[in-house]
Image (tube, rainbow, N blue to C red):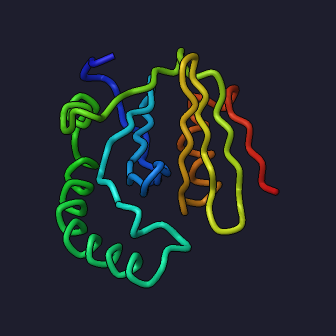
Amino acid sequence: MSGSSEVVLGEIHVVARLEMGSEKLILFPTDSRIIVARVGKRGAGEMAGVGMLGRLSGVLENLLKGGRESMSRHGLSSRSPREILASHRDNFALSFGEIVRIEVLKETLTTRIMILTDRDKLEFYTGVSLDKIENVLGKNLRSKMIVNRR
């Protein structure tokens, strides 16, 4: 859907774990889909449990990339769904029809969001409150959501 009447209902800042490092993303639920927007990648240096040299490289990477990412994050919030999708070639959307289930699990320090589609399983981690996630995603997807507060 790319009509001008599509409305962004909120945003959820998340991290996706990669084989080597992680990727910062923003989920933009609209009234018909979830837009997944790329903010930036982090190398293995930022991963927990890495030695001192790895942690230092993660800090350096944050210093070098942080300003650019911050500017792009703030710019995305004020854009239309079509502009958010067009802002980076790796941005994509999940229509509500292709979403089979969303599982939200409150863990000790983070919240895990697993989105199961008819062809993929996407896993994200966030520090956003469980209530905000339920509020933003549940507006149109409550029947497909499973929330576990542990």
79 left or right, relative to 10 = left
Instruction: List x then y, in percent, for residue 30.
Output: 42, 32
Residue at image point 42% right, 57% down: 21
Q: Give the number of callouts.
A: 0
Residue at image point 38% right, 27% down: 93
Which residue is farthest bottom? Answer: 52
**Where on the picture, by quarter, is residue 62?**
bottom left
Instruction: List x then y, in percent, for residue 51.
Output: 48, 79
Instruction: List x then y, in percent, for residue 36.
Output: 38, 37
Instruction: List x then y, in percent, for residue 104.
Output: 67, 45
- Quarter of the picture containing the N terminus is top left
Residue at image point 46% right, 20% down: 95
Q: Is residue 109 above or below residue 18?
A: below
- Quarter of the picture containing the C terminus is bottom right
**Where on the picture, by quarter, is residue 72?**
bottom left
> Which of the pair 119/133 is nearer the observer?
119
45 left or right, relative to 80 = right
Q: Is residue 97 above or below residue 139?
A: above
Which residue is farthest right? Answer: 150
> Which of the pair 144/39 is nearer the observer?
39
Residue at image point 24% right, 22% down: 4
112 left or right, relative to 105 = left
**Where on the picture, by quarter, is residue 79?**
top left
